[in-house]
Image (cartoon, coloured by chain):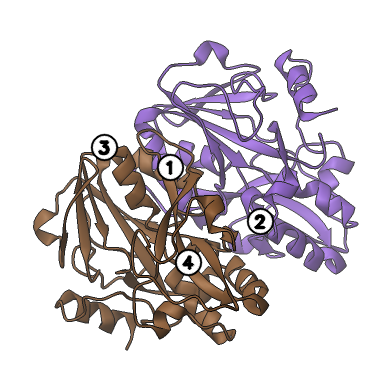
Chain colours: A brown, B purple
Protein backbone atom coordinates (compact mmCIF):
# COMPACT_ATOMS: atom_id res chain seq x y z
CA UNK A 1 0.00 0.00 0.00
CA UNK A 2 1.31 3.50 -0.82
CA UNK A 3 1.14 6.31 1.77
CA UNK A 4 -1.59 7.98 -0.31
CA UNK A 5 -3.66 4.75 -0.38
CA UNK A 6 -3.16 4.32 3.36
CA UNK A 7 -4.33 7.89 4.07
CA UNK A 8 -7.46 7.28 2.00
CA UNK A 9 -8.19 4.23 4.18
CA UNK A 10 -7.72 6.36 7.31
CA UNK A 11 -9.86 9.14 5.84
CA UNK A 12 -12.80 6.69 5.62
CA UNK A 13 -12.14 5.65 9.28
CA UNK A 14 -11.23 2.15 8.05
CA UNK A 15 -7.95 2.20 10.02
CA UNK A 16 -7.97 3.42 13.65
CA UNK A 17 -4.87 1.80 15.20
CA UNK A 18 -1.21 2.71 15.80
CA UNK A 19 0.72 3.29 12.57
CA UNK A 20 3.98 1.57 13.60
CA UNK A 21 5.17 -0.63 10.73
CA UNK A 22 2.87 0.96 8.12
CA UNK A 23 4.37 1.86 4.71
CA UNK A 24 8.02 1.09 5.55
CA UNK A 25 10.49 3.61 4.11
CA UNK A 26 8.20 6.63 4.45
CA UNK A 27 8.37 9.25 7.19
CA UNK A 28 5.54 9.50 9.71
CA UNK A 29 4.52 12.74 11.43
CA UNK A 30 3.15 13.96 14.76
CA UNK A 31 0.61 16.80 14.86
CA UNK A 32 0.02 19.92 16.92
CA UNK A 33 -2.67 22.38 15.84
CA UNK A 34 -2.75 25.76 17.60
CA UNK A 35 -4.47 29.12 17.13
CA UNK A 36 -2.25 31.57 15.22
CA UNK A 37 -1.93 33.69 18.37
CA UNK A 38 0.16 30.89 19.95
CA UNK A 39 2.06 29.89 16.80
CA UNK A 40 5.15 32.10 17.25
CA UNK A 41 5.74 30.89 20.79
CA UNK A 42 5.47 27.26 19.67
CA UNK A 43 7.66 27.66 16.57
CA UNK A 44 10.34 29.26 18.78
CA UNK A 45 9.86 26.46 21.33
CA UNK A 46 10.52 23.93 18.55
CA UNK A 47 13.56 25.90 17.35
CA UNK A 48 14.98 25.77 20.88
CA UNK A 49 14.21 22.05 21.29
CA UNK A 50 15.00 20.46 17.91
CA UNK A 51 15.64 16.95 19.25
CA UNK A 52 12.14 16.30 20.70
CA UNK A 53 10.36 18.77 18.34
CA UNK A 54 11.89 18.53 14.83
CA UNK A 55 9.55 20.47 12.54
CA UNK A 56 8.89 18.80 9.17
CA UNK A 57 6.30 21.29 7.86
CA UNK A 58 4.14 24.20 9.04
CA UNK A 59 0.88 24.96 7.23
CA UNK A 60 -0.47 28.29 6.12
CA UNK A 61 -2.98 29.79 8.61
CA UNK A 62 -6.37 28.06 8.27
CA UNK A 63 -5.17 25.51 5.73
CA UNK A 64 -5.60 21.74 6.13
CA UNK A 65 -3.28 21.07 3.16
CA UNK A 66 0.38 20.10 3.15
CA UNK A 67 2.99 20.37 0.39
CA UNK A 68 6.35 18.86 1.43
CA UNK A 69 4.81 15.85 3.17
CA UNK A 70 2.24 14.93 0.51
CA UNK A 71 -0.17 16.97 -1.57
CA UNK A 72 -3.26 14.73 -1.31
CA UNK A 73 -3.58 15.26 2.43
CA UNK A 74 -6.29 16.48 4.80
CA UNK A 75 -4.88 17.29 8.22
CA UNK A 76 -8.32 17.04 9.84
CA UNK A 77 -8.97 13.49 8.61
CA UNK A 78 -5.74 11.65 7.72
CA UNK A 79 -4.53 10.73 11.21
CA UNK A 80 -6.21 7.58 12.59
CA UNK A 81 -7.05 9.28 15.89
CA UNK A 82 -6.95 12.80 17.37
CA UNK A 83 -7.03 14.48 20.76
CA UNK A 84 -8.44 17.87 21.70
CA UNK A 85 -7.12 19.86 24.66
CA UNK A 86 -8.73 22.96 26.21
CA UNK A 87 -6.64 24.93 28.73
CA UNK A 88 -4.26 21.96 28.87
CA UNK A 89 -7.00 19.45 29.75
CA UNK A 90 -7.58 16.47 27.46
CA UNK A 91 -11.25 16.69 26.39
CA UNK A 92 -11.62 13.55 24.28
CA UNK A 93 -10.38 11.45 21.36
CA UNK A 94 -11.84 11.78 17.86
CA UNK A 95 -11.58 9.97 14.49
CA UNK A 96 -11.75 13.33 12.67
CA UNK A 97 -11.36 16.95 13.78
CA UNK A 98 -13.17 18.40 10.78
CA UNK A 99 -16.01 19.74 12.95
CA UNK A 100 -13.55 21.57 15.21
CA UNK A 101 -11.61 23.27 12.44
CA UNK A 102 -11.24 27.06 12.53
CA UNK A 103 -9.81 29.60 10.11
CA UNK A 104 -7.23 30.84 12.66
CA UNK A 105 -5.48 27.46 13.14
CA UNK A 106 -1.87 26.61 12.25
CA UNK A 107 -0.67 22.98 12.04
CA UNK A 108 2.80 21.84 13.00
CA UNK A 109 3.93 18.49 11.56
CA UNK A 110 6.71 17.00 13.67
CA UNK A 111 9.11 14.12 12.95
CA UNK A 112 8.26 10.69 14.40
CA UNK A 113 10.61 7.88 15.38
CA UNK A 114 8.35 5.30 13.66
CA UNK A 115 10.07 6.62 10.52
CA UNK A 116 13.38 4.94 11.31
CA UNK A 117 12.07 1.61 12.60
CA UNK A 118 12.23 0.15 9.09
CA UNK A 119 15.95 0.96 8.93
CA UNK A 120 16.50 -0.65 12.35
CA UNK A 121 14.69 -3.81 11.21
CA UNK A 122 16.88 -3.88 8.07
CA UNK A 123 19.89 -3.69 10.42
CA UNK A 124 18.74 -6.86 12.18
CA UNK A 125 17.11 -5.15 15.18
CA UNK A 126 13.73 -6.43 16.36
CA UNK A 127 11.18 -3.68 17.11
CA UNK A 128 9.31 -5.23 20.02
CA UNK A 129 6.04 -3.22 19.80
CA UNK A 130 5.72 -4.24 16.14
CA UNK A 131 6.40 -7.90 16.99
CA UNK A 132 3.87 -7.76 19.83
CA UNK A 133 1.39 -5.73 17.73
CA UNK A 134 0.90 -2.98 20.32
CA UNK A 135 1.59 0.77 20.49
CA UNK A 136 5.15 1.89 21.35
CA UNK A 137 5.68 2.59 25.09
CA UNK A 138 6.17 6.31 25.82
CA UNK A 139 7.18 7.93 29.11
CA UNK A 140 7.27 11.40 30.64
CA UNK A 141 10.79 12.29 31.83
CA UNK A 142 12.35 14.79 34.23
CA UNK A 143 14.37 16.39 31.37
CA UNK A 144 13.26 20.04 31.09
CA UNK A 145 12.65 21.66 27.71
CA UNK A 146 14.06 25.11 26.92
CA UNK A 147 11.00 27.35 27.46
CA UNK A 148 9.74 29.83 24.84
CA UNK A 149 6.92 32.28 25.50
CA UNK A 150 4.03 30.40 27.07
CA UNK A 151 5.45 26.94 26.32
CA UNK A 152 7.47 24.81 28.73
CA UNK A 153 7.45 21.23 30.01
CA UNK A 154 9.54 18.07 30.02
CA UNK A 155 10.72 15.79 27.22
CA UNK A 156 8.64 12.67 26.44
CA UNK A 157 10.56 9.61 25.22
CA UNK A 158 9.71 6.43 23.34
CA UNK A 159 11.38 3.20 24.53
CA UNK A 160 12.63 0.24 22.55
CA UNK A 161 14.41 -2.71 24.20
CA UNK A 162 17.59 -3.48 22.21
CA UNK A 163 20.11 -6.31 22.56
CA UNK A 164 23.41 -5.04 24.01
CA UNK A 165 25.30 -6.19 20.93
CA UNK A 166 23.01 -4.09 18.69
CA UNK A 167 22.92 -0.79 20.61
CA UNK A 168 25.85 0.76 18.73
CA UNK A 169 24.09 -0.08 15.44
CA UNK A 170 20.84 1.45 16.69
CA UNK A 171 22.69 4.64 17.62
CA UNK A 172 24.53 5.01 14.32
CA UNK A 173 21.47 4.23 12.17
CA UNK A 174 19.20 6.72 13.95
CA UNK A 175 21.91 9.40 14.30
CA UNK A 176 21.66 9.92 10.54
CA UNK A 177 17.99 10.95 10.82
CA UNK A 178 17.84 14.07 13.03
CA UNK A 179 14.56 15.14 11.38
CA UNK A 180 12.81 12.19 13.07
CA UNK A 181 14.53 12.59 16.51
CA UNK A 182 17.96 11.18 15.58
CA UNK A 183 20.09 9.24 18.07
CA UNK A 184 18.75 8.07 21.46
CA UNK A 185 18.90 10.60 24.29
CA UNK A 186 19.48 7.95 26.98
CA UNK A 187 20.50 4.30 27.12
CA UNK A 188 20.07 1.91 30.00
CA UNK A 189 19.31 4.08 33.04
CA UNK A 190 15.60 4.97 33.15
CA UNK A 191 15.72 6.16 36.79
CA UNK A 192 18.17 8.91 35.83
CA UNK A 193 15.51 10.52 33.60
CA UNK A 194 12.67 9.98 36.06
CA UNK A 195 11.24 6.70 34.74
CA UNK A 196 10.70 4.20 37.57
CA UNK A 197 8.32 1.60 36.12
CA UNK A 198 8.88 0.39 32.56
CA UNK A 199 5.74 -1.78 32.76
CA UNK A 200 3.54 1.31 33.17
CA UNK A 201 4.09 3.77 30.30
CA UNK A 202 2.45 7.23 30.33
CA UNK A 203 1.35 6.77 26.70
CA UNK A 204 1.04 3.64 24.53
CA UNK A 205 1.55 0.07 25.76
CA UNK A 206 4.13 -1.88 27.78
CA UNK A 207 6.34 -4.35 25.89
CA UNK A 208 8.45 -7.35 26.94
CA UNK A 209 12.07 -6.57 27.87
CA UNK A 210 14.24 -9.71 27.70
CA UNK A 211 17.25 -10.39 29.93
CA UNK A 212 19.79 -9.66 27.22
CA UNK A 213 18.16 -6.33 26.33
CA UNK A 214 18.69 -2.73 27.50
CA UNK A 215 15.94 -0.07 27.38
CA UNK A 216 16.88 2.62 24.85
CA UNK A 217 15.09 5.99 24.91
CA UNK A 218 14.49 8.30 21.94
CA UNK A 219 12.99 11.81 22.12
CA UNK A 220 9.31 11.57 21.14
CA UNK A 221 6.89 13.75 19.20
CA UNK A 222 4.34 13.41 22.01
CA UNK A 223 6.53 16.02 23.77
CA UNK A 224 4.35 18.90 22.42
CA UNK A 225 1.29 17.25 24.06
CA UNK A 226 3.08 17.14 27.41
CA UNK A 227 3.98 20.80 26.86
CA UNK A 228 0.32 21.59 26.10
CA UNK A 229 -0.71 19.91 29.36
CA UNK A 230 1.98 21.84 31.28
CA UNK A 231 1.51 25.20 29.51
CA UNK A 232 -2.29 25.24 29.08
CA UNK A 233 -2.89 27.13 25.82
CA UNK A 234 -6.61 27.84 25.41
CA UNK A 235 -7.03 25.36 22.55
CA UNK A 236 -4.92 22.64 20.95
CA UNK A 237 -5.57 19.62 18.75
CA UNK A 238 -3.07 16.78 18.33
CA UNK A 239 -2.83 13.26 16.98
CA UNK A 240 -3.43 10.48 19.51
CA UNK A 241 -0.01 9.08 20.57
CA UNK A 242 1.13 6.40 18.10
CA UNK A 243 -1.57 7.31 15.57
CA UNK A 244 0.49 9.22 13.03
CA UNK A 245 0.22 10.78 9.59
CA UNK A 246 1.90 8.50 7.03
CA UNK A 247 3.59 10.92 4.61
CA UNK A 248 4.87 10.67 1.04
CA UNK A 249 8.33 11.83 2.20
CA UNK A 250 10.91 9.09 1.80
CA UNK A 251 13.23 8.51 4.76
CA UNK A 252 16.08 8.68 2.25
CA UNK A 253 15.37 12.39 1.78
CA UNK A 254 15.86 12.92 5.52
CA UNK A 255 19.19 11.10 5.88
CA UNK A 256 22.12 13.37 6.76
CA UNK B 1 42.25 36.99 21.91
CA UNK B 2 39.10 35.30 23.24
CA UNK B 3 35.68 35.97 21.65
CA UNK B 4 34.69 37.94 24.77
CA UNK B 5 37.83 40.10 24.56
CA UNK B 6 37.22 40.67 20.84
CA UNK B 7 33.61 41.75 21.48
CA UNK B 8 34.81 44.25 24.10
CA UNK B 9 37.14 45.72 21.46
CA UNK B 10 34.23 45.99 19.02
CA UNK B 11 31.99 47.45 21.72
CA UNK B 12 34.44 50.38 22.07
CA UNK B 13 34.42 50.81 18.25
CA UNK B 14 38.12 49.85 18.19
CA UNK B 15 37.47 47.20 15.47
CA UNK B 16 35.31 48.14 12.46
CA UNK B 17 36.39 45.67 9.72
CA UNK B 18 35.30 42.28 8.39
CA UNK B 19 35.60 39.51 10.99
CA UNK B 20 36.94 36.76 8.67
CA UNK B 21 39.82 34.97 10.40
CA UNK B 22 39.04 36.40 13.87
CA UNK B 23 39.10 33.94 16.84
CA UNK B 24 39.56 30.71 14.83
CA UNK B 25 37.49 27.80 16.17
CA UNK B 26 34.52 29.91 17.29
CA UNK B 27 31.25 30.32 15.42
CA UNK B 28 30.36 33.70 13.96
CA UNK B 29 26.78 34.94 13.52
CA UNK B 30 24.72 37.08 11.17
CA UNK B 31 21.99 39.37 12.55
CA UNK B 32 18.43 40.31 11.66
CA UNK B 33 16.39 42.44 14.07
CA UNK B 34 12.66 42.77 13.38
CA UNK B 35 9.58 44.07 15.19
CA UNK B 36 7.72 41.27 17.00
CA UNK B 37 4.81 41.70 14.57
CA UNK B 38 7.03 40.29 11.79
CA UNK B 39 8.84 37.66 13.90
CA UNK B 40 6.54 34.68 13.22
CA UNK B 41 6.72 35.15 9.46
CA UNK B 42 10.52 35.34 9.59
CA UNK B 43 10.97 32.37 11.94
CA UNK B 44 8.77 30.30 9.61
CA UNK B 45 10.78 31.63 6.63
CA UNK B 46 13.97 30.41 8.33
CA UNK B 47 12.36 27.04 9.12
CA UNK B 48 11.49 26.63 5.43
CA UNK B 49 14.98 27.73 4.26
CA UNK B 50 17.42 26.14 6.72
CA UNK B 51 20.41 26.12 4.36
CA UNK B 52 20.69 29.90 3.82
CA UNK B 53 18.99 30.83 7.16
CA UNK B 54 20.17 28.42 9.91
CA UNK B 55 18.97 29.93 13.20
CA UNK B 56 21.51 29.75 16.03
CA UNK B 57 19.53 31.72 18.62
CA UNK B 58 16.43 33.93 18.93
CA UNK B 59 16.25 36.53 21.72
CA UNK B 60 13.37 37.31 24.02
CA UNK B 61 11.28 40.29 22.81
CA UNK B 62 13.09 43.57 23.61
CA UNK B 63 16.23 41.88 24.92
CA UNK B 64 19.73 42.65 23.66
CA UNK B 65 21.16 39.68 25.57
CA UNK B 66 22.05 36.20 24.32
CA UNK B 67 22.52 32.93 26.19
CA UNK B 68 23.64 30.08 23.89
CA UNK B 69 26.08 32.23 21.89
CA UNK B 70 27.73 34.03 24.82
CA UNK B 71 26.37 35.65 27.96
CA UNK B 72 28.51 38.83 27.99
CA UNK B 73 26.96 40.11 24.77
CA UNK B 74 25.17 43.29 23.66
CA UNK B 75 23.44 42.81 20.32
CA UNK B 76 23.26 46.56 19.72
CA UNK B 77 27.03 47.09 20.09
CA UNK B 78 29.00 43.86 19.51
CA UNK B 79 28.89 43.71 15.71
CA UNK B 80 31.57 45.89 14.05
CA UNK B 81 29.03 47.48 11.71
CA UNK B 82 25.23 47.55 11.26
CA UNK B 83 22.69 48.45 8.61
CA UNK B 84 19.18 49.84 9.06
CA UNK B 85 16.43 49.25 6.49
CA UNK B 86 13.03 51.00 6.35
CA UNK B 87 10.43 49.57 3.95
CA UNK B 88 13.21 47.50 2.38
CA UNK B 89 15.42 50.54 1.66
CA UNK B 90 18.92 50.67 3.13
CA UNK B 91 19.06 53.88 5.19
CA UNK B 92 22.67 53.87 6.40
CA UNK B 93 25.47 52.02 8.19
CA UNK B 94 26.15 52.46 11.92
CA UNK B 95 28.81 51.42 14.46
CA UNK B 96 26.09 50.86 17.08
CA UNK B 97 22.29 50.56 16.91
CA UNK B 98 21.77 51.42 20.59
CA UNK B 99 19.91 54.62 19.74
CA UNK B 100 17.48 52.76 17.47
CA UNK B 101 16.59 50.02 19.95
CA UNK B 102 12.91 49.45 20.77
CA UNK B 103 11.12 47.27 23.28
CA UNK B 104 9.21 45.40 20.54
CA UNK B 105 12.30 44.07 18.71
CA UNK B 106 13.30 40.42 18.30
CA UNK B 107 16.83 39.44 17.18
CA UNK B 108 17.62 36.43 15.01
CA UNK B 109 21.22 35.18 15.12
CA UNK B 110 22.04 33.18 12.00
CA UNK B 111 24.96 30.87 11.24
CA UNK B 112 27.88 32.29 9.21
CA UNK B 113 30.28 30.47 6.88
CA UNK B 114 33.26 32.34 8.40
CA UNK B 115 32.83 29.76 11.18
CA UNK B 116 34.19 26.88 9.08
CA UNK B 117 37.06 28.73 7.36
CA UNK B 118 39.42 27.72 10.14
CA UNK B 119 38.63 24.04 9.46
CA UNK B 120 39.22 24.55 5.73
CA UNK B 121 42.61 26.18 6.44
CA UNK B 122 43.51 23.25 8.70
CA UNK B 123 42.64 20.98 5.74
CA UNK B 124 45.21 22.75 3.58
CA UNK B 125 42.77 25.03 1.75
CA UNK B 126 43.71 28.67 1.27
CA UNK B 127 40.91 31.16 2.02
CA UNK B 128 41.61 33.82 -0.56
CA UNK B 129 39.78 36.76 1.08
CA UNK B 130 41.76 36.15 4.28
CA UNK B 131 45.05 35.98 2.33
CA UNK B 132 44.16 39.17 0.45
CA UNK B 133 42.83 40.84 3.63
CA UNK B 134 39.48 41.84 2.11
CA UNK B 135 35.81 40.99 2.78
CA UNK B 136 34.46 37.73 1.30
CA UNK B 137 32.73 38.19 -2.11
CA UNK B 138 28.94 37.66 -1.91
CA UNK B 139 26.46 37.48 -4.79
CA UNK B 140 22.71 37.59 -5.29
CA UNK B 141 21.47 34.49 -7.15
CA UNK B 142 18.37 33.49 -9.12
CA UNK B 143 17.60 30.67 -6.61
CA UNK B 144 14.18 31.42 -5.05
CA UNK B 145 13.58 30.99 -1.33
CA UNK B 146 10.47 29.20 -0.05
CA UNK B 147 8.21 32.13 0.90
CA UNK B 148 6.58 32.47 4.33
CA UNK B 149 4.07 35.21 5.18
CA UNK B 150 5.47 38.53 4.02
CA UNK B 151 9.00 37.18 3.37
CA UNK B 152 10.35 36.03 0.02
CA UNK B 153 13.43 36.61 -2.11
CA UNK B 154 16.44 34.83 -3.56
CA UNK B 155 19.39 33.09 -1.93
CA UNK B 156 22.63 35.06 -1.45
CA UNK B 157 25.89 33.08 -1.69
CA UNK B 158 29.48 33.60 -0.59
CA UNK B 159 32.21 32.52 -3.03
CA UNK B 160 35.60 30.97 -2.34
CA UNK B 161 37.96 29.91 -5.16
CA UNK B 162 39.20 26.37 -4.42
CA UNK B 163 41.81 24.23 -6.21
CA UNK B 164 40.12 21.38 -8.12
CA UNK B 165 42.07 18.81 -6.12
CA UNK B 166 40.68 20.26 -2.85
CA UNK B 167 36.99 20.64 -3.70
CA UNK B 168 35.98 17.22 -2.37
CA UNK B 169 37.72 18.07 0.92
CA UNK B 170 35.95 21.43 1.09
CA UNK B 171 32.59 19.69 0.59
CA UNK B 172 33.13 17.01 3.21
CA UNK B 173 34.52 19.40 5.83
CA UNK B 174 31.66 21.91 5.52
CA UNK B 175 28.96 19.23 5.15
CA UNK B 176 29.50 18.43 8.83
CA UNK B 177 28.47 21.96 9.87
CA UNK B 178 24.86 22.50 8.70
CA UNK B 179 24.35 25.13 11.44
CA UNK B 180 26.74 27.45 9.56
CA UNK B 181 25.38 26.72 6.03
CA UNK B 182 26.93 23.27 5.55
CA UNK B 183 28.10 22.02 2.14
CA UNK B 184 28.30 24.30 -0.93
CA UNK B 185 25.07 24.76 -2.91
CA UNK B 186 26.87 25.10 -6.26
CA UNK B 187 30.32 24.40 -7.65
CA UNK B 188 31.84 25.75 -10.85
CA UNK B 189 28.90 27.16 -12.85
CA UNK B 190 28.08 30.70 -11.66
CA UNK B 191 25.92 31.51 -14.74
CA UNK B 192 23.53 28.71 -13.79
CA UNK B 193 22.61 30.56 -10.57
CA UNK B 194 22.49 33.99 -12.17
CA UNK B 195 26.03 35.22 -11.46
CA UNK B 196 27.66 36.66 -14.58
CA UNK B 197 30.59 38.72 -13.27
CA UNK B 198 32.72 37.30 -10.48
CA UNK B 199 34.80 40.50 -10.37
CA UNK B 200 31.76 42.53 -9.31
CA UNK B 201 30.18 41.03 -6.14
CA UNK B 202 26.88 42.40 -4.80
CA UNK B 203 28.32 42.51 -1.26
CA UNK B 204 31.94 42.42 -0.03
CA UNK B 205 35.03 42.50 -2.25
CA UNK B 206 36.29 40.68 -5.35
CA UNK B 207 39.18 38.21 -4.90
CA UNK B 208 41.73 36.68 -7.27
CA UNK B 209 40.68 33.39 -8.93
CA UNK B 210 43.70 31.48 -10.23
CA UNK B 211 43.68 29.26 -13.32
CA UNK B 212 43.71 26.02 -11.33
CA UNK B 213 40.78 27.12 -9.13
CA UNK B 214 37.01 26.69 -9.42
CA UNK B 215 34.53 29.13 -7.82
CA UNK B 216 32.63 27.37 -5.01
CA UNK B 217 29.38 28.88 -3.65
CA UNK B 218 27.99 28.51 -0.12
CA UNK B 219 24.59 29.77 1.08
CA UNK B 220 25.16 33.04 2.94
CA UNK B 221 23.63 34.71 5.99
CA UNK B 222 23.20 37.93 4.02
CA UNK B 223 20.19 36.16 2.47
CA UNK B 224 17.82 37.69 5.10
CA UNK B 225 18.98 41.17 4.00
CA UNK B 226 18.16 40.37 0.39
CA UNK B 227 14.77 39.12 1.63
CA UNK B 228 14.26 42.38 3.57
CA UNK B 229 15.00 44.36 0.39
CA UNK B 230 12.57 42.17 -1.60
CA UNK B 231 9.83 41.93 1.06
CA UNK B 232 9.97 45.47 2.52
CA UNK B 233 9.08 45.03 6.21
CA UNK B 234 8.55 48.47 7.82
CA UNK B 235 11.74 48.23 9.90
CA UNK B 236 14.78 45.94 10.05
CA UNK B 237 18.28 46.17 11.45
CA UNK B 238 21.10 43.84 10.37
CA UNK B 239 24.86 43.49 10.59
CA UNK B 240 26.83 44.92 7.68
CA UNK B 241 27.83 42.02 5.38
CA UNK B 242 31.07 40.41 6.61
CA UNK B 243 30.95 42.26 9.94
CA UNK B 244 29.77 39.47 12.24
CA UNK B 245 29.24 38.69 15.91
CA UNK B 246 32.11 36.52 17.18
CA UNK B 247 30.43 34.10 19.59
CA UNK B 248 31.64 31.92 22.46
CA UNK B 249 30.16 28.85 20.75
CA UNK B 250 32.87 26.43 19.65
CA UNK B 251 32.57 25.04 16.13
CA UNK B 252 33.05 21.63 17.71
CA UNK B 253 29.62 21.93 19.33
CA UNK B 254 28.07 22.43 15.88
CA UNK B 255 29.68 19.45 14.14
CA UNK B 256 27.22 16.73 13.12
Q: Position of residue A103 (x, y in %)?
A: 16, 48
Q: Position of residue A138 (x, y in %)?
A: 40, 62
Task: Specify the label residue A37 is tagged with.
Answer: 3
Residues at marks 3 and 1, CA–CA distance in whole angstroms: 14 Å
The answer to whether the residues at label 1 and label 4 have Cβ atoms under 8 Å apart is no
Residues at marks 2 and 1, CA–CA distance in whole angstroms: 23 Å
Residue B209: which quarter of the image?
bottom right
- Judging from the image, mark 4 belongs to the subunit labelled A
Callout 1: SS? helix
Measured along the vertical axis of the image, is residue A199 above or below residue B145? below
The residue identified by callout 2 is B182
Measured along the vertical axis of the image, is residue B93 above or below residue A106? above
Q: Nearer the viewer, mark 2 or mark 4?
A: 4
- Residue at mark 1 shares a chain with residue at mark 4: yes
Task: Specify the label residue A45 is tagged with.
Answer: 1
A182 horizontally vs A107: left or right? right
The answer to whether the residues at label 2 and label 3 have Cβ atoms under 8 Å apart is no
The answer to whether the residues at label 3 and label 4 have Cβ atoms under 8 Å apart is no
Nearer the N terminus, badge 3 or badge 4? 3
Mark 2 surroundings: few (<14), some (14-19) or many (≥20) residues within 10 A: many
The residue identified by callout 4 is A159
Q: Position of residue A245 (x, y in %)?
A: 31, 69
Q: Which quarter of the figure is the N terminus of chain B placed in?
A: top right
- In the image, what residue occupies the spot 50% across and 43% down? A48
A219 horizontally vs B16: left or right? left
A33 horizontally vs B242: left or right? left
Q: Position of residue A176 (x, y in %)?
A: 60, 68
Residues at marks 2 and 3, CA–CA distance in whole angstroms: 33 Å
Amino acid sequence: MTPTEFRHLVRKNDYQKSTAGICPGFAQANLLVLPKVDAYDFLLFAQRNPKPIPILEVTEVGSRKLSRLGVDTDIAKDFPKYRIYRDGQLINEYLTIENYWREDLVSFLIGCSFSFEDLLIQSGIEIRHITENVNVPMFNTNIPLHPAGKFSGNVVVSMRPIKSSKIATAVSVTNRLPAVHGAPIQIGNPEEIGIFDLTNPDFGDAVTINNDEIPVFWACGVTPQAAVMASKPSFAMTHSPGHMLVTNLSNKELIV
